[in-house]
Image: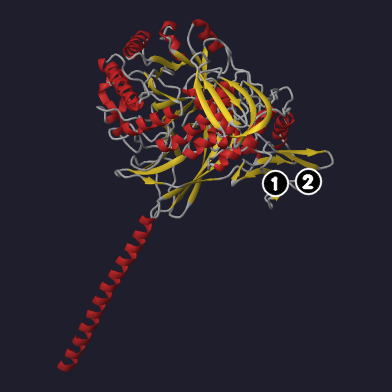
C-alpha cells in the first residue's frame, strides 16, 4: 500500500512538473507571439489616407471631396485621443451637423482633422470614406491635401501618414464653366485644338534670327563669320545708350562697341545664341527697359543657392538683369543676419509645434520634422549670399533683396518674440490675404525700427563685401490687413524706415500699396501687379518710377491653364508662354522695368521652379527688351520650340510642353495638332494602347474618350481629353478673342 502511494506521488509530481514546464513554455510562446504582433503593429504606420475629388458646384461655389481613412493599427480607432495635421491650399471646410470628422482651418494653409462625437470606431484593417464639403473649387492637383501627420494625445512625436490620390478621370471632375476673368473653359480637346491652330496659323518671317530678345536693328551683308576663328575687338563709348552695343561682323573680325561692360556682355550673349556661324553685317541693340527681372520666392519653399545659379545663367543668356530676391515672409526667414541668430534658428524651420518657440507652423507642406531635408527648412548663410551676389554680378545681374514689412512678418515676430509684439497688440483682430491673424509687427515698439535698421545695415555690409554695392532695397509694404495698424502708426513706421534707407543712400522699392505711405518725392519704385494699365499709369503720372508686374501676364507661379494636372495658383488667371509675350505693355517715361514673379506656395522642388519659369521666361525677355516687339506670334513660337526649348533639354533643365489639341471632323475623322514640331504626338482610345499620330485617324465605334499628349526628350505634356458624346462646348460670345490667349 505504501509502495503504491509512493508510486502515485511520484507520478503526480512528474505530471505537475511537466504541466508547470508546459505553462512556462506556453507563457514564453505567448510573450514571443505578443512581441511579434506588437512589433509588427509598431512597424506599420497607424493609418493611411486616400483622397478623391468628387464634384465641383454641388452647391454654388461648393465642392465635395472624399477622405478614406484606413486603420493599420492593432486597436480600434475611436473618437478620442488623435488629431491629423496637414496642409491644404485655397479651399475652406464646411462642417455639417452629424459629420464624423471635423476639418479645421487653423492658420492659412494649415489644417487639422479631429473625430467628432459621432465618429464610430474604426476596426483594425478596416477603411471608411468620409464626404466633406468645401467653399471653392478643387480643379487641379494644387487643390489637394498633403503633408499629413498624426499626433496622439500625450505624445510629443508625430507620425507621418501616407496619402494617395485618385486620378481625375470623370467629366464631372474636370469640366468647368466659364471662368470670369479669362473666359476660358477646361482645356479639353476641341478648345485646345482651336487655341493651338491660332498659334500655328500666325504668320512667320523668314528674316528672324535665332535670338531672344531680338536685336533692335540688324543689317546683313554677304558672307558668314566663324565665331571661333574670328578676332573679337571690344571698345566702350559712354555716349551710347546704357547696356547697348553695336556689332560689326566681317568674315574675320567681330568689333563690339558698347556703352559699358554690360553692353559688351550682352553683345557676347547675342553671339553665344547665334552659334558657331553668324551672318556678316551690323547689329545695333539696346534695351527699352533697364529693369528686366524675375522675383524668386525662397520663403514659402526653399531652394539652395547652387540651384539658383541655374536660373541666373538662363537670365543672363537672355539679357535679364535683376534678381528680386524675396527672402522673408510669414512662413520663414531665409537669410542669416549676424547678431540675430534666432531669425534663422527658429524662423527658417517649420514643423509640428504647440508654441513656435523652436520652429514655425508647417505651412505649405514640409511635414512635422523641422530638421528634415525638405523645402520647408533651410536658409542662406552670409557666406553663401555673398557668393550668390558675386555670381550674379559676373553676369551683370543686380540682386535686390526684399524684406516685406510691416505685414508679412509672422516669421520675424515668432522668432524675435515679445521684442516685436506683445499680448495687447496681439489682441487686435484682423485677417491677412493669406488668412493669417498674427502676421503684423507692433510698429509702436521702439525695437521695431531698431530691428529693421540692424537688418538693413547687415545686408549693406554683405553687398559691399561681395563688391556689389546695394543701391535699392525692397520693403514690400503690401497686404497689411485692416485692423492691424492705425494709419498714423503705419505712416510713422514707414517714415522711420525711409530715414534708414536714406542714411545708406538706398532707393526704396515695394509693391504698389506703398504709394499710400511713400510720397512721389521719395522716388520709391513701385511694382504694379494688378491687371490693368490704370494703376501703373496713375503712378507713373504722379512721378513714381514704375515696374510692370501684371499678375495675369507675369505671375509665373500661376498655372499654365486650368487643366487638372497643372500645378500652380489661379487667383488672377492663368499664365503660359504666350501670355508673357502676346501683349502691349504700358509705355511711359516713368515705366522703368518689367518683372516676373515666382511665388513659392505650391512649388515643392527646384525642378518645379524650372517647370514654371520655362518657357514663360522667353516672353518676358523679349518684351522687357523690346516693348513693341516686331516678332509675330508665329515667329515667337518657332523660336521657343525650335531653338530654345531644345537648348534647355540639352542642358538637362526641366520645362513645360504645351498639350495637343483634338478635333472631330465631319466624316468621323479625328484631327490632332501641337505647337512643338519636334515633339511626338501620342494618342489612345479610352484606356487602350498609346499610338503615334501622323495623320487624321478614324474614330472607332464605341469609344467614349480620346486622349493625346506630346512627348519630347523624356518629357511629356499634360494629357488632353476629348469626350466623344459630350464634348465641352463654349459660348462663342464668351470665348477669348485674343490670339494666343491662355486656355
Q: Nearer the viewer, residue 165 or 581?
A: 581
Q: Nearer the viewer, residue 67 or 656?
A: 656
* Badge 2 density bin: few <14, some 14–19, many ≥20, Cα 10 Å: few
* Residue 697's disc number: 2
- Coloring basis for residues: secondary structure
Q: Could you say which quadrant of the image residue 586 lies in? A: top right
Question: Is residue 318 visible in this depiction of the protein?
Answer: no
Compared across the picture, whether 71 is left or right of 221 comes to left
Q: Position of residue 151 (x, y in %)?
A: 35, 43
- The residue identified by callout 1 is 683
Instruction: Name the quadrant containing residue 677.
Output: top right
Would residue 224 be found to the left or right of residue 103 on screen?
right
In the displayed structure, would residue 83 be above or below residue 60? below
Q: Quadrant of the N terminus?
A: bottom left
Image quarter of the C terminus: top right
Number of labels in the image equals 2
Toward which corner of the image does residue 520 lie, by quadrant? top left
Q: Are marks 1 and 2 in contact (CB under 8 Å)?
A: yes
Residue 557, which numbered label?
none
Bin the neighbour count of mark 1 within 10 Å (Cα to Cα): few under 14, some 14-19, many 20 and up: many
Q: Residue 464 location in percent, x, y?
A: 33, 23
Q: Residue at x 51, y 15 (%)?
A: 592
- Residue 127 percent across, percent down from the top left: 49, 50
Amino acid at each position: 500500500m505504501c509502495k503504491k502511494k509512493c508510486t502515485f506521488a511520484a507520478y503526480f509530481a512528474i505530471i505537475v512538473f511537466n504541466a508547470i514546464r508546459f505553462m512556462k513554455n506556453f507563457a514564453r510562446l505567448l510573450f514571443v507571439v505578443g512581441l511579434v504582433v506588437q512589433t509588427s503593429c509598431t512597424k506599420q504606420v497607424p493609418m493611411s489616407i486616400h483622397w478623391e475629388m468628387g464634384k465641383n458646384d454641388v452647391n454654388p461655389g461648393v465642392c465635395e471631396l472624399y477622405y478614406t481613412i484606413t486603420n493599420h493599427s492593432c486597436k480600434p480607432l475611436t473618437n478620442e485621443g488623435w488629431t491629423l495635421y496637414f496642409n491644404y491650399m485655397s479651399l475652406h471646410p464646411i462642417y455639417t451637423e452629424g459629420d464624423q470628422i471635423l476639418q479645421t482651418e487653423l492658420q492659412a494653409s494649415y489644417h487639422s482633422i479631429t473625430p467628432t462625437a459621432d465618429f464610430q470606431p474604426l476596426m483594425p484593417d478596416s477603411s471608411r470614406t468620409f464626404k466633406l464639403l468645401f467653399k471653392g473649387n478643387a480643379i487641379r492637383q494644387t487643390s489637394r491635401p498633403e503633408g499629413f501627420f498624426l499626433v496622439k494625445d500625450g505624445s510629443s512625436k508625430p507620425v507621418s501618414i501616407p496619402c494617395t490620390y485618385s486620378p481625375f478621370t470623370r467629366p464631372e471632375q474636370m469640366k468647368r464653366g466659364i471662368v470670369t476673368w479669362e473666359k476660358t473653359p477646361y482645356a479639353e480637346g476641341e478648345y485646345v485644338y482651336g487655341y493651338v491652330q491660332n498659334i500655328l496659323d500666325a504668320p512667320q518671317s523668314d528674316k528672324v534670327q535665332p535670338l531672344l530678345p531680338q536685336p533692335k536693328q540688324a543689317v546683313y551683308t554677304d558672307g558668314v563669320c566663324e565665331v571661333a576663328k574670328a578676332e573679337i575687338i571690344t571698345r566702350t563709348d559712354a555716349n551710347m545708350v546704357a547696356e547697348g552695343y553695336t556689332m560689326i561682323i566681317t568674315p574675320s573680325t567681330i568689333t563690339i562697341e558698347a556703352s559699358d561692360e554690360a553692353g559688351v556682355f550682352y553683345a557676347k550673349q547675342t553671339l553665344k545664341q547665334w552659334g558657331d556661324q553668324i551672318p556678316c553685317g551690323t547689329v545695333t541693340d539696346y534695351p527699352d527697359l533697364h529693369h528686366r527681372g524675375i522675383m524668386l520666392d525662397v520663403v514659402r519653399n526653399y531652394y539652395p543657392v547652387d540651384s539658383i545659379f541655374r536660373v541666373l545663367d538662363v537670365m543672363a543668356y537672355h539679357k535679364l538683369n535683376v534678381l528680386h530676391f524675396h527672402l522673408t515672409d510669414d512662413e520663414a526667414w531665409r537669410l542669416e543676419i549676424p547678431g540675430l541668430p534666432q531669425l534663422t534658428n527658429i524662423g527658417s524651420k517649420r514643423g509640428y509645434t504647440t508654441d513656435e518657440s523652436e520652429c514655425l507652423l508647417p505651412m505649405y507642406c514640409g511635414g512635422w520634422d523641422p530638421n528634415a531635408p525638405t523645402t520647408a527648412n533651410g536658409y542662406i548663410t552670409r557666406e553663401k549670399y555673398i557668393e550668390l551676389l558675386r555670381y550674379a554680378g559676373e553676369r551683370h545681374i543686380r540682386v535686390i533683396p526684399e524684406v516685406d514689412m510691416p505685414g508679412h512678418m509672422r516669421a520675424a515676430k515668432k522668432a524675435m518674440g515679445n521684442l516685436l509684439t506683445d499680448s495687447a497688440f496681439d489682441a487686435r483682430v484682423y485677417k491677412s490675404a493669406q488668412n493669417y491673424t498674427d502676421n503684423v509687427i507692433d510698429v509702436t515698439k521702439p525695437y521695431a525700427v531698431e530691428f529693421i535698421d540692424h537688418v538693413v545695415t547687415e545686408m549693406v555690409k554683405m553687398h559691399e563685401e561681395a563688391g556689389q554695392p546695394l543701391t535699392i532695397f525692397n520693403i514690400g509694404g503690401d497686404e497689411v490687413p485692416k485692423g492691424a495698424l492705425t494709419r498714423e502708426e503705419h505712416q510713422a513706421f514707414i517714415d522711420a524706415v525711409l530715414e534708414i534707407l536714406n542714411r545708406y543712400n538706398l532707393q526704396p522699392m515695394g509693391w504698389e500699396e506703398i504709394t499710400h505711405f511713400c510720397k512721389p518725392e521719395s522716388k520709391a519704385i513701385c511694382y504694379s501687379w494688378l491687371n490693368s494699365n490704370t494703376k501703373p499709369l496713375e503712378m507713373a503720372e504722379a512721378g513714381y518710377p514704375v515696374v510692370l508686374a501684371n499678375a495675369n501676364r507675369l505671375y509665373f507661379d500661376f498655372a499654365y491653364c486650368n487643366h487638372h494636372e497643372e500645378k500652380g495658383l489661379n487667383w488672377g488667371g492663368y499664365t503660359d508662354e504666350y501670355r508673357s509675350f502676346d501683349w502691349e505693355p504700358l509705355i511711359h517715361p516713368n515705366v522703368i522695368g518689367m518683372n516676373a514673379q515666382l511665388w513659392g506656395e505650391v512649388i515643392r522642388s527646384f525642378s518645379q521652379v524650372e517647370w514654371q519659369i520655362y518657357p514663360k521666361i522667353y516672353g518676358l525677355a523679349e518684351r522687357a527688351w523690346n516693348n513693341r516687339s516686331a516678332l509675330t506670334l508665329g515667329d515667337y513660337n518657332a523660336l521657343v520650340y525650335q531653338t530654345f526649348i531644345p537648348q534647355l533639354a540639352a542642358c538637362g533643365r526641366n520645362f513645360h510642353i504645351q498639350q495637343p489639341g483634338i478635333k472631330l471632323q465631319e466624316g468621323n475623322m479625328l484631327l490632332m495638332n501641337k505647337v512643338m514640331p519636334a515633339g511626338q504626338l501620342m494618342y489612345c482610345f479610352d484606356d487602350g494602347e498609346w499610338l503615334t499620330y501622323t495623320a487624321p485617324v478614324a474614330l472607332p465605334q464605341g469609344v467614349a474618350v480620346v486622349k493625346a499628349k506630346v512627348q519630347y526628350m523624356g518629357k511629356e505634356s499634360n494629357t488632353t481629353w476629348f469626350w466623344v458624346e459630350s464634348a465641352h462646348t463654349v459660348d462663342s460670345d464668351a470665348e477669348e478673342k485674343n490670339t494666343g490667349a491662355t486656355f
